[in-house]
């Protein structure tokens, strides 16, 4: 029985932790302190629920306990109480607002408060004052509800290293006096970009792991999808938010087809598309339609996530690989390069051009990138060149490129895939 209760608490924490930390942070105006108070509520649940039973509204119970802890702390701590008074909050009014009413009342204003708390937490966790690694760790900790050990395992670092990273991130926010509030309109676009970047980097690490034995880490994919869907609810009129959700849904739809029966990677053109998840495809296309509709209404040019989602949609709409509209994909990569210049985007365009206009045209673009030098340590550049050279019948050069790519990757499954392609080129 105790085990089942603990499993329920763990699942509930994963879902509710962000809202709880956000609600408490609005009271104490300190993200680190808010997380400690939320953790105290979690410990109280682990102590009481196995004995007393799970309450009718467990999320409300956790939120009430955490908020009560915040109010107790405010009564004892003069400086925190003064801070509360300075921001114009009425402590007595807060105490009379019961959390069950706060959570369950359908009044739009109160519902908006909960959403605003979570949105503030997202923008705080992804504040530009933090390094990218710190943003990722803090986002998974505060909004994903992951334990420090889980985050450490996901990014292949010792738990102590990840714990220090998270502690430093919270300390940095405190020392910089980062306010727990939404950014002003002039900064909203830039700050939203940081939030989207953090969520997508988490997704990418799950979709194709940078290192380790496994090619994918589905738990990180799921967390990024959950965060993206929450963000779409909180910022419903931002086309790039819906574009990111569409991109992740469409890419995640391929998960079951990306590994064969022996758990070896399967490249996109070789995948059994009947195994793609139709529900995720439909969700992704619907999110892309919402993004396009909002962008048209506000006469905005398509942003990088919308453009990448359009590319993913070209693949999703092709029921067989040979039906893929590679010319349209090449055009979209050209638009993406104009919006977000990057050698990686140009490498992807080289692949699309190679499919649309022949391997010689694609290789010309890839050779330019090799001469440029910015992708010298990026294993996908020699991998792409190896594929194009192989199609041109230049087998010895292709073998050398696949060998170079295998030496550059830190992911064991990816390395084996590249070595297999090297052997195939030799056999041919």
Image (cartoon, rainbow, N blue to C red):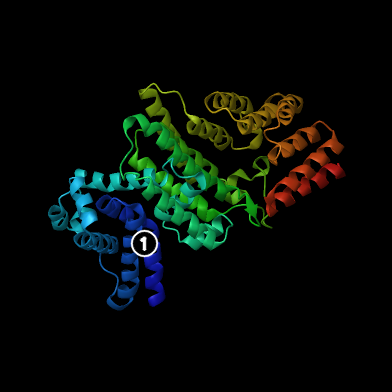
Q: Position of residue 317 (x, y in %)?
A: 55, 35
Residue 34 visible, this angle: yes
Q: Position of residue 59 (x, y in %)?
A: 29, 60
* Residue at 29% in and 64% down: 58
The residue to which callout 1 is attached is 12
* Residue at 80% in and 36% down: 390
Residue 104 visible, this angle: no
Q: Quadrant of residue 375?
A: top right
The N terminus lies in quadrant: bottom left
* Residue at 52% in and 31% down: 310
The C terminus lies in quadrant: top right
Q: Position of residue 394 (x, y in %)?
A: 85, 33
Residue 162 placement, left or right of 375: left
Foreground pick, 152 / 356: 152
Q: Is residue 292 above or below residue 376?
A: above
Indicate the secondary structure of the residue bearing disc 1.
Answer: helix
Foreground pick, 203 / 158: 158
Q: Position of residue 181 (x, y in %)?
A: 30, 42
């Amino acid at each position: 029985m105790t085990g089942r209760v603990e499993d329920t608490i763990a699942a509930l924490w994963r879902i509710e932790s962000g809202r709880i930390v956000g609600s408490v942070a609005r009271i104490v105006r300190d993200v680190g302190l808010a997380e400690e108070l939320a953790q105290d509520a979690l410990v109280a649940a682990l102590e009481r629920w196995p004995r007393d039973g799970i309450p009718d509204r467990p999320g409300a119970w956790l939120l009430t306990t955490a908020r009560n802890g915040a109010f107790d702390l405010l009564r004892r701590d003069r400086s925190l109480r003064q801070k509360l008074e300075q921001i114009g909050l009425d402590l007595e009014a807060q105490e009379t607002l019961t959390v069950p009413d706060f959570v369950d009342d359908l009044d739009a204003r109160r519902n908006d408060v909960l959403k605003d708390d979570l949105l503030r937490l997202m923008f705080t966790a992804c504040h530009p004052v933090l390094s990218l690694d710190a943003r990722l760790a803090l986002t998974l900790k505060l909004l994903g509800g992951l334990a420090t050990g889980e985050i450490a395992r996901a990014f292949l670092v010792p738990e102590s290293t990840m714990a220090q990273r998270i502690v430093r991130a919270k300390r940095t926010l405190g020392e910089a006096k980062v306010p727990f509030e939404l950014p002003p309109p002039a900064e909203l676009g830039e700050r939203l970009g940081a939030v989207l970047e953090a969520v997508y980097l988490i997704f990418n690490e799950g979709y194709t792991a940078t290192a380790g034995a496994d090619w994918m880490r589905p738990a990180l994919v799921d967390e990024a999808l959950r965060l993206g869907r929450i963000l779409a609810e909180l910022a419903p009129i931002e086309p790039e938010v819906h574009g990111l959700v569409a991109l992740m849904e469409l890419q995640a739809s391929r998960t079951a087809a990306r590994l064969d029966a022996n758990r070896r990677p399967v490249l996109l053109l070789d995948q059994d598309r009947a195994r793609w998840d139709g529900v995720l495809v439909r969700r992704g296309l619907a999110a892309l339609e919402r993004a396009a509709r909002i962008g048209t209404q506000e006469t905005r040019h398509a942003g990088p996530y919308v453009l990448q989602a359009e590319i993913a949609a070209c693949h999703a709409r092709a029921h067989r690989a040979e039906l893929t509209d590679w010319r349209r994909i090449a055009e979209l990569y050209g638009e993406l390069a104009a919006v977000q210049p990057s050698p990686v985007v140009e490498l992807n365009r080289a692949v699309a051009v190679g499919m649309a206009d022949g391997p010689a045209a694609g290789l010309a673009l890839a050779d330019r990138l090799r001469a440029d030098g910015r992708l010298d340590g990026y294993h996908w550049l020699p991998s792409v060149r190896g594929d194009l050279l192989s199609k041109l019948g230049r087998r010895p050069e292709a073998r050398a490129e696949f060998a170079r790519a295998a030496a550059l990757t830190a992911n064991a499954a990816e390395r084996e895939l590249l070595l297999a392609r090297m052997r195939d080129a030799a056999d041919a």
